[in-house]
Amino acid sequence: MTDSTLERRTASLRNASWDDIREIFSLAPDTIHLNTGTVGAMPYEVLDTLDQVTREWAGGLLDVYAPTMFTDYRATIGRALGADQDEIVICHNATEGIARVINGLDLHEGDEVVTTTHECYSVLSNFNLLRNRFGIKIKAVTPPTGYDVRAEDIVELVEAAVTPRTKVLAFAAITLFTGTAMPIRMLCDVAQRHGLITVVDGALLPGVLNRNLRSLGVDFMACSGSKFQCGPLGTGILYVRNKVNPEYNRLPLPVFWPIISTWYPMQGSPPPRTRTRVESDNIGDYLQSAGSANLARGAGLARASELWDEIGRDRIEARTMELADFARERLSQTFGEERIYSPSSDFRLRSPLVAFNPFRPSDAWNVKKFAALTARLADEYRVWIRWTEFNVPNSPHQHYAARFSGHIYNTDEEIDHAVRLIARIASAESGS
Ligand SMILES: Cc1ncc(COP(=O)(O)O)c(C=O)c1O
């Protein structure tokens, strides 16, 4: 694309209506996709990029190793997330990024990790692995759920779990089960007060919440590229703090072992980590260099990121939150605010995900109802949502919820239709 064509394109996507923007996505016809928290719909241009780059490299006559560093793509993605190329890694998904971070921490017997029971399995299973392997201790608090939860309720609960032995604070940017947008900056302030490393599961953040990762002050954030960022399946973005900007995080860079690396020196040690705003080494290169890679994946993810910049990340966040607020309103009118698990009145905790119980309160423990509801919606009505399960304070049993996660290709009408269908199915189930 020439510069002037790109400028025209950017201007047109920036001003395009949401109806027009919906047309750029390869959405299955006659479906309502309200499950972007699991996987986003890909733009046609991303599919084309995947195809084109795969063909370009399919002949076998080119050196596939050099481009696996994805240097330009990492810079493009980094710019969108407020980070530099040396702080960004393109990996396979959030799970892989999280595993590489957790297993790369310098933790020893008796060290403690504070986290929550609402973390994804990918976080909790990796910490449990370190517990079994090294004897670390995990303290997982259960965050409160419900319409009127406030950010301070969560921050105070987390801080109360910190002890002099705590080394790491781990939490999700947006929780998978109740769609709580965790107060990242407030939790990072807690971590910095106590000298803790922050590990953030950002699977659901990029592509929807327009955040500058460096200014959040986190040490590590592992993100998915295929959810709200709508990149190819099997893409993830890993952010690793690689310089000290005291206005965001004055703590020294943590000791970190970049596992799965063909760039880490074969003898001796890398240079000591910087204590200033200037990197002493490229930690991103260490992690990026991990043997042959699917080159089309990196190109596809970078293309998705550019498209988001063209549409406008601030605009995407505003639109997605507007849709979620509409969903919240319709769900509250239909089932009552008390059936909504996602914190809603405190705008700091709102995300595009809304989790709710459309059945009787006592059915919150009945997994069969939630599984049957999501299956019927998909099979009979081609409406795609998901159900989740999570701990609730003082409840002897996990609760289940139905979860909406809308994105810029959804409409109020789709949400309204889904709420009506769910109300109909739930009321038939309750026999009322
Ligand atoms: C909060 C959260 N963390 C991690 C994951 C795993 O993401 P990935 O499929 O990119 O590994 C998910 C998946 O839904 C998630 O929602």
Image (cartoon, rainbow, N blue to C red):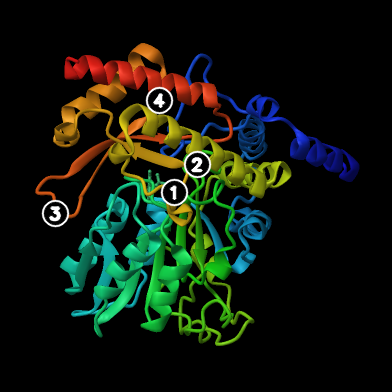
| Mark 2: C-beta under 8 Å from nearest atom of ligand 1 | yes
Residue 274 lies, in percent from the top left, at 55, 85
Marks 1 and 3, the one that precedes in the sequence: 1
Left or right: 162 in relation to 190: left
> SS for tag 3?
loop
Between the residue at mark 3 and the residue at mark 2, the CA separation in whole angstroms equals: 35 Å
Outermost right residue: 4
Q: Which residue is mark 3?
A: 394
> SS for tag 2?
loop
Q: Is residue 408 above or below residue 164?
A: above
Amino acid type of the residue tagged 1 in the rendering: Asn
Mark 1 and mark 2 residues within 8 Å of each other at the beta carbon: yes
Residue, x 44% and y 49% (percent of image)? 93
Amino acid type of the residue tagged 3 in the rendering: Asn
- Placement of the N terminus among the 4 image quadrants: top right
**In the image, which disc is placed on residue 384?**
4
Q: Nearer the viewer, residue 115 or 98?
A: 115
Between the residue at mark 4 and the residue at mark 3, the CA separation in whole angstroms equals: 31 Å
| Mark 1: C-beta under 8 Å from nearest atom of ligand 1 | yes
Mark 4 and mark 1 residues within 8 Å of each other at the beta carbon: no
Q: Which residue is mark 1?
A: 93
Mark 4 and mark 3 residues within 8 Å of each other at the beta carbon: no
**In the image, which disc is placed on residue 226?**
2
Marks 4 and 2, the one that precedes in the sequence: 2
| Badge 3 density bin: few <14, some 14–19, many ≥20, Cα 10 Å | few
Between the residue at mark 1 and the residue at mark 3, the CA separation in whole angstroms equals: 34 Å
Residue 76 visible in the current orientation:
yes
